[in-house]
């Protein structure tokens, strides 16, 4: 089994990439991918550890793009993590977070919550992509909310009183930086897109295929069996790779287990073989 969607402490996960590799090995996974938001920083460490312990590590990243006013997540697999354009574009997104985060602090302060950016940065530690989950953690620690979920519901969710928009690439830009870094651009968890309806999904996938995506994240903890089957059908119909992962964030999302999601997810290694075959024929 494999898990191709994992966050580390380089973004909003709570385990380092070394810890993730060890955990994955302990669970008997054959391959993983570190897909942090807006950074590829955890990849090299994971690959180094992976080589040592016999765990395949697929280089990855997750970026958010804006489509018709809504956020859509893209995953990039087999990216060259040293690619200059990829690195500078990601750095831009991180720089924007540095502008956005103090604005979130201002909003929280004006709502009467005593929280500073220093506290958020302290929670994020060596993290590169600091974001709302880190704010949520501070709010929990200071007793303003019971848990992260409440922090999002009351304050941080999109449209919530402390929400500040994030800079997002256009779908075209997002897809191109992944391709330009020799990666496979994949549409992440399609059922998570705000307001997406079953009947819109095929059209939506076709639009993104037209813009260059080469895969769909079919296996995902929140997809029910019908949704998984539906996405698999679309992937096969349109010649797209099938990927899958848990979106593991460690303690940040404690219900999600590495490799198995809510417990029952099984993502077959065969998906990796197919992705590699596709890369060969594209060469
Ligand atoms: P940011 O990149 O700063 O906008 O934060 C986005 C991250 O926040 C996502 O990757 C999720 O991990 C987390 N997140 C978004 N919405 C929620 C929510 N309603 N509850 C818990 N976590 C959330
Ligand atoms: Zn996240
Ligand atoms: Fe995502
Ligand atoms: Fe994710």
Image (cartoon, grey):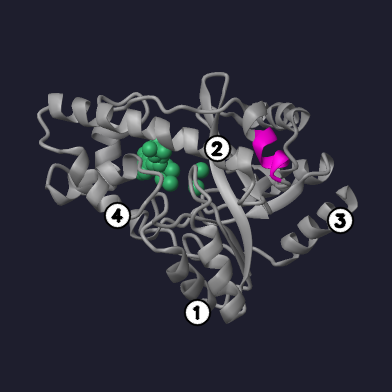
Circle 4 or circle 1, nearest the eye: 4
Tell me if mark 1 has few (under 14), some (14-19) or many (20+) residues whose alpha carbon lies within 10 angstroms of its own. few
* Residue drawn at x 20%, y 26% as measured from the top left: 106
Q: Quadrant of residue 172?
A: top right
- Closest to the camera, between mark 3 and mark 1, is 3
Q: Nearer the viewer, residue 134 or 224?
A: 134
Residue 251 is situated, as x and y percent measured from the top left of the image, at 33, 59
| 124 magenta-colored | no
Question: Would you name the residue on which mark 2 appears?
Answer: 88
Q: Does label 2 point to a residue whose CB lies under 8 Å from ligand 1? A: no
What residue is pinned by disc 1? 26
Mark 2, residues whose alpha carbon is within 10 Å: few (<14), some, or many (≥20)? Answer: few
Check disc 3 and report its element: helix, strand or loop.
Answer: helix
Mark before the other along the chain sequence, 1 or 2: 1
> How many other residues sit within 10 Å of disc 4, few (<14), some (14-19) or many (≥20)?
some
Q: Earlier in the sequence, mark 3 or mark 4?
A: 4
Residue 159 drawn above or below residue 86: above
| Residue of label 4 | 125
Left or right, 151 with respect to 58, comes to left
CA–CA distance in space, label 4 to label 1: 25 Å
Residue at 70%, 49% (x, y): give it: 229
């Amino acid at each position: 089994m494999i898990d191709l969607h994992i966050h580390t402490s380089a973004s909003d996960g709570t385990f380092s990439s070394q810890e993730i590799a060890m955990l994955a090995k302990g669970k008997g996974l054959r391959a993983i991918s570190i897909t942090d938001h807006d950074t590829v920083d955890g990849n090299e460490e994971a690959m180094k550890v992976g080589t040592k312990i016999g765990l395949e590590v697929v280089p990855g990243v997750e970026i958010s793009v804006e489509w018709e006013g809504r956020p859509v997540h893209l995953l990039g697999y087999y990216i060259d993590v040293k690619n200059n354009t990829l690195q500078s574009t990601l750095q831009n997104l991180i720089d924007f977070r540095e502008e956005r985060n103090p604005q979130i602090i201002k909003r929280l302060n004006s709502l009467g919550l005593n929280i500073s950016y220093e506290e958020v940065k302290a929670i994020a530690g060596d993290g590169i992509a600091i974001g709302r989950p880190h704010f949520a953690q501070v709010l929990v620690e200071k007793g303003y909310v019971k848990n992260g979920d409440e922090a999002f519901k009351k304050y941080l969710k999109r449209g919530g009183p402390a929400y500040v928009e994030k800079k997002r690439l256009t779908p075209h830009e997002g897809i191109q930086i992944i391709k330009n870094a020799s990666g496979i651009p994949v549409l992440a968890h399609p059922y998570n897109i705000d307001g997406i309806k079953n009947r819109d999904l095929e059209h939506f996938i076709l639009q993104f295929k037209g813009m260059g995506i080469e895969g769909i994240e079919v296996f995902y903890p929140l997809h029910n069996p019908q949704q998984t089957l539906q996405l698999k059908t679309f992937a096969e119909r349109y010649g797209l790779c099938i990927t899958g992962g848990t979106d593991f964030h460690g303690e940040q999302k404690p219900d999600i287990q590495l490799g198995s999601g809510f417990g029952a997810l099984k993502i077959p290694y065969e998906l990796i073989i197919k992705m590699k075959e596709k890369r060969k024929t594209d060469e």
